[in-house]
Amino acid sequence: MNIKKSGFNTKLIHAGEINDQFCSATVPIYQTSTFGFESAEEAAKCFAGESDGYIYTRIGNPTINALERQIAVLENGYGAIAVSSGMAAVTTIYLALLSSGDHIVSTDAIYGPSRGVMENQFVRFGFQSTYINTANIENVEKAIRPNTKVIYIETPSNPTMDITDLKAVAEIAHKHSCLLVVDNTFCSPYLQNPLDLGADIVFHSMTKSINGHADIIAGIIIAKEEKLYNQLRNMMINLGCNMDPHQAYMVIRGLKTLSIRIDRATENAEKVAVFLENHHKVAWVKYPGLKSHPQFDLGKCQMKLSGSMISFGLQGGYEAAKMLMNNVHLAMLAVSLGGIETLIQHPASMTHSKVSVEEKIKSGITDDLIRFAVGIEDAEDIIADLKQGLEKI
Ligand SMILES: *Cc1c(COP(=O)(O)O)cnc(C)c1O
């Protein structure tokens, strides 16, 4: 059977399989830091790259590699590099691709720390960055400079839910000899495959939907070509932000149900979005599955489903948002997303609190914006919870 030719759900269950001597049904946890060699000659061959035995877990480990093989297949990439967290993926990518004096163009409304680390830390190393609304594709070409090396996209953007046209942005990137990097965390490989649309590198915080059970921090980078893959893997090995075998096992376990979890969460989110849009205390709702979303058609085109993330604002602004967050009981007031449980949070004072006030306004992270991550509970219960919370305002 050629696993690459099978359907997505079959890949979820079988793409990471290991053929060990016991025919184990699941990938065993190789909880070891180092691996012995049969002989000095064999050791030398391994280190010379002439044989592919395992050496040391920071470099490679059978449990971690099973997960990497599986995600590479799910994203149609050459190879994947598992890392300790989503932020480890972000920093590995920045450090592998940029040198002092290089410039990056990025979506403005992205995961807060992905921008924070660039503007507050890596600026010391001479990295230059421009943040723009990439959903307006004209902004991208205008922002490119002679020293631009990377275009960095999050779509839908976080937390504004704007959609960037991946095909169009890939064309612009390549026309200017830039690499296109996409943070695909919001969608997971089930909903969107940016490498198929022209991206060079995709990464995920697997803390979110890929693992899906709110019990692990993890990340992964997928490269389209061998050269980029090697460049990224070498950087990961030297930074030492490798995944741990037990962590890999947990992600492999969570990953198997990715599609059924996202199907349910999306079904719920669609109902929640309609409920919110029809509620008189709600000022606006931004959800890719609503006709009112300005890029509804583009979303349908590049995303398999609309996903589980909703942004909305209340008539009463931040004061009303606080009252809602303090009065919901089923939805947990917490950051993160893509898990089995419903979460609510306020980006301006929480995940994006480090972004300056001017930049928040510029990138649409308004004071009234509530980010709602829909879980897989019963839609009726999630809606009833919101309804009673809204009544308290
Ligand atoms: C959570 C998240 C990250 C960072 O991942 P960690 O696993 O928390 O380090 C990056 N990008 C997006 C879109 C995220 O949601």
Image: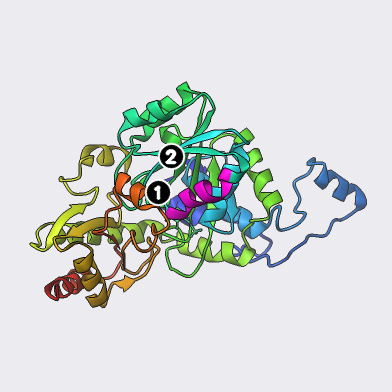
Above or below, 265 against 327 in this view is above
Front in this rendered view, residue 59 or 91: 91
Left or right: 29 in relation to 321: right
Q: Is ligand 1 closer than 8 angstroms to the Cβ of mark 1? A: yes
How far separated are the C-alphas under marks 1 and 2? 8 Å
The residue drawn where x is 26% and y is 78% is: 329
Q: Which residue is mark 2?
A: 106
Task: Return the x and y of residue 34 as percentages of the image width and height.
Answer: 77, 61
Classify residue 331 by image quadrant.
Answer: bottom left
Q: Which residue is mark 1?
A: 110
Magenta highlight: main SS: helix
Q: Which residues are magenta?
A: 112-123
Classify residue 330 by image quadrant.
Answer: bottom left
**Secondary structure state at the residue bearing disc 2:** strand
Q: Quadrant of the C terminus?
A: bottom left
What type is the residue that disc 2 sits on?
Ser
Q: Are marks 1 and 2 in contact (CB under 8 Å)?
A: yes
What type is the residue that disc 1 sits on?
Ile
Q: Is ligand 1 closer than 8 angstroms to the Cβ of mark 2? A: no
Q: Is residue 34 magenta?
A: no
Task: Return the x and y of residue 238 as percentages of the image width and height.
Answer: 71, 49
Neighbour tally class for label 2: few under 14, some 14-19, many 20 plus, Cα within 10 Å: many
Classify residue 26 by image quadrant.
Answer: bottom right
Q: Is residue 70 visible?
A: no
Q: Is residue 143 visible?
A: yes
